[in-house]
Image (tube, rainbow, N blue to C red):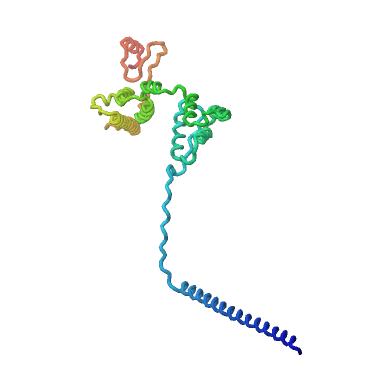
Amino acid sequence: MDSAEAEQMAAALGAQDARLSRQEEFQTSLASHISLLSSQIQGLRDLFVQDTTAPRAPTVEAAPPPTAVVHGSGGRLAPPEKFAGEQGLCKTFLIDCSIHFELTPHAFPTERSKVAFMMTHLTGRAKAWASAEWARDSPLCFSLTEFKAALQRVFDPVSTDREKAQELSRLRQGDSSVCDYVIHFRTLAAESGWNSTALYDVFLKGLGAPVQDLLVPLDLPPDLDSLIALAIRTDNRLRQLRRDRSNSSATAEGYPRSRAPGGPDPQRAPPDQPGPFTTEEGGEPMQLGRARLTTGERLRRQQEGRCF
């Protein structure tokens, strides 16, 4: 073996020795990592065992977060009633829609969305009118104020405060109760624009005669609310008195009349009394029983030998 081959052999052995050394280092490092990983796994196992065997402290439930109160969210809001253009109901429909907008402002960010909501609650001729305005892209559909004013002009043009005042002045209780009269009175009074003094006199004038008669000897209260309360109490007492008298009469008719000692039974019909009849000779009718005979009849019977 020459020197060149010897050097190659030595180099190959050196390289092999280096690879073996690196492999040993890798194995040593790997064993170290495996040992560390094993110790960590064992530590986790020990913690898990301690956690499952040790008594748990009572857990305090966290209080639920406070419920966010959204303005106007008081439950499910009923939609306004449909409006078909009936006279006298336009104002009520507009008020219902205004309340809906007030309680759910987040649902209507624009004026046009409010107009669209109102249109979905129109029907009949009111729906036809609004649909025509919407189809031609009328400026009314971009302003809630203008749309409401136009709706009222079209379908409630004669509803004025003056007419409400005239209707209020003609209002009478009639056969209704004072409570019903008060409801109608207050509805018209709110739209009439009259002051409390005028309303006081109109209310008193519209009461029924029976209630007015009972109020005459009394000192009337100075304000309208007290007068209304007094009229309601008076009417309630009057109606209760009528019911009591009606019940008393019905009870008295249901009981039999008392029988006097030795007298006839009131429940037994009296015997039929013999009615008048005509004699065969066509004379005057006579009454059977203890009726007296005339002088001529006595003489005739005496001559014929008949008994009296």
Q: How many labels were placed on the picture?
A: 0
Residue 252 in view in this figure = no
| Of 3 and 134, the residue lying toward us | 3
Residue 167 higher or lower than 243, as above or below: above
Residue located 38% across and 17% down the image: 276
Q: Nearer the viewer, residue 295 or 3?
A: 3
What is the residue that sits farthest to the bottom in this orientation?
Answer: 1
Q: Residue furthest front?
A: 3
User: Which quadrant holds residue 295?
Assistant: top left
11 shown above or below 282? below
Q: Is residue 142 visible?
A: yes
**Where's residue 122, x and y in %?**
52, 31
The x and y percentages for residue 225 are: 30, 31
Q: Quadrant of residue 218?
A: top left
Q: Residue at x 43, y 69 (%)?
A: 56
Locate residue 190 relative to residue 227 in the image: left or right: right
User: Among all residues in the image, which is located at the extreme right?
Assistant: 1
> Residue 291 location in percent, x, y?
32, 17
